[in-house]
Image (tube, grey):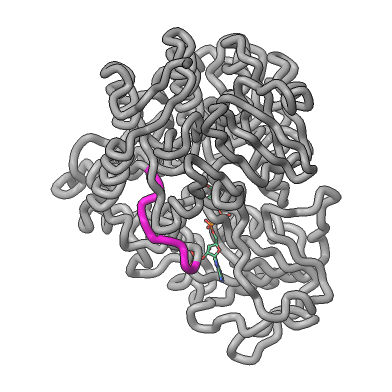
Amino acid sequence: VEDSVSRPLDALVVGAGISGIYQLHLLRQLGLDAKGVEAESDIGGVWYSNRYPGARVDSDAALYQYSWKGLWEGWQFSERFPSRDEILKYLHYVDETFGVRQHFRFNMRVIRARFNDAGCIWEVTTDDGRTIKTRFLVMCLGCASKPYQPHFKGLERFQGEWYHTARWPKSGAKMEGKRVGVIGTGASGIQVIQEAGKVAKELVVFQRTPILTFPMRQSTQAEASRCIYPAIFEHRKTTFSGFDVDLVPKPAVGGAPARQVVFDELWGRGGLAFWLGMYDDTIVDDTANDYAYAYWRDKVRQRIHKPDLVEKLAPTVKAHPFGTKRPALEQNYYEVFNQDNVTLVDLNECPIDEVTCNGVLTKDGVEHILDLLVIATGFDMATGGYNDIEIVGQNGALFRDKWADGVKSYLGVLASGFPNMFMVFGPHAPGALSNGPTCAEWQADCVVDCIEYMMKNSFVRIEASAEAEQDWTRRVHEIGAMGLWDRANSWYRGANIPGKTSEHLFWCAGFPAYRKACKEVVESGYDGIMFTKRL
Ligand code: NA7
């Protein structure tokens, strides 16, 4: 990185998470002078920064890893759904095997990237004042690199400790014997809640929307299961969500009595199967959606022992269509609420007034006294990381201006007016609507194939045409509008951030359709993409 002040790199990868590690290794395998920069002090991306108690992946271990040959043979996760710590160990094992980490520089946050049109070079400025020149800029920022923390009046006065889940202190924060409050019941919040339930003296959960959960059915991993990994890696490329289950290709409506058998089987499997292995009309048809919701509601209700919490945790009528907000896996979530020392505050009935020096004061005048306040309010998904960087393209155009009224991209990988910049695991692709490694591998492979194609043809510059970008953006929105997604204020649509454009941030037509679209572009000789030859 240092040398590149005078001599440009071939490629700079921004971000050392799941996609950045994979991408950088591929670029170097291609023989490019490629380096990486990462704002945090080590590899891991979201797994490095999300170190709150209970952090764990919702994908099966066999799916949540790279499919590279020479890698999976030597690694065994100990649990079906690995913990954050074990995922980091895995990524360090990847580094020991392939030596990727040495090509990253850490504690370097990219604050600006400017495309120098005359030189066809990106000039990238980091927060320590360095300028790195590179021919290609590959953004592997992840979807959840920018935490979202609402303004809570009085938070600065709070005498206890408080942390956003994505900014948990490296030294840890003890919950044992403490009065713990958790704001937010998304995937992160419910993981913390389950850990706090075991050790806290008192636990107060501030809930705005009840989360839809599925039983994790955690288990230890059998060594023998590894022999089927190659088949799993192939299979995951063919399923709607990049997981090992696929949608049932028939309607749930009219499907009784078999429906009950299918529901029981999916529920018994555990993991995200009850969502990703559902009937294929579940996300488009309200009646089908109601079937899935009712099954879920009735299963969950059996475990809630406090009568006043039944309606709050699993309402009779769905708060939003089943599966249109990110569900999450749980192991003992509902049992936590059965404990005498656990309170649920429904923020719809009783909003937070302010944070006091002692805790959280709600509108009913109750001051919830706390030692530790956990803010589990999520992320400015998919676009937050991009908007934080001053990306300047052709003719001084600002990327954040381009996206101000909505994301515009071609295949979620290229953006018109921003030549030689690639995006991996960003918006307009299956991204966070799919299994992370499946999508990251595919997109990173596409980027490397494209750069190889350019090298063979002596192309030095690549850019999406404005028409191709418009067309892709329209497709993303049209496909999204076919489902019930618009009835949920979810981060899939940017609706969790006040003021953010509400739109379909991800490709909702499934991973195989995305792959097909990418392949068609390549096979047509890169339709919609303009290349420029070396002068
Ligand atoms: P999420 O899924 O965005 O969850 C955030 C939670 O915080 C959710 O329950 C929100 O309620 C709640 N929230 C947000 N703003 C507020 C305010 N102002 N007051 C009270 N409660 C609020 O983030 P996670 O970190 O849990 O998960 C992110 C993803 O990372 C996860 O799905 C995995 O893919 C990995 P709401 O539902 O908006 O009413």
**Left-right relation of 242 to 288:** right
Q: Quadrant of ligand 1?
A: bottom right
Q: Residue at x 26, y 36 (%)?
A: 248
Determine whether 278 is above or below 213 in the image. above
x and y, in percent, of residue 91 in the image: 68, 27
- Viewer can see residue 212: no
Outermost left residue: 254
In depth, the one of 354 and 516 nearer the eye is 516
Q: Residue at x 54, y 27 (%)?
A: 120
x and y, in percent, of residue 131 in the image: 72, 36
x and y, in percent, of residue 535 in the image: 47, 16
**Left-right relation of 29 to 516:** right
Determine whether 187 is above or below 236 in the image. below
x and y, in percent, of residue 359 in the image: 74, 78
**Left-right relation of 85 to 453:** right
Question: Is 502 part of what is drawn in magenta?
Answer: yes
Task: Tell me where residue 7 sits by quadrant.
Answer: top right
What span is colored magenta in the figure?
498-506
The chief SS type of the magenta part is loop
Outermost bottom residue: 365
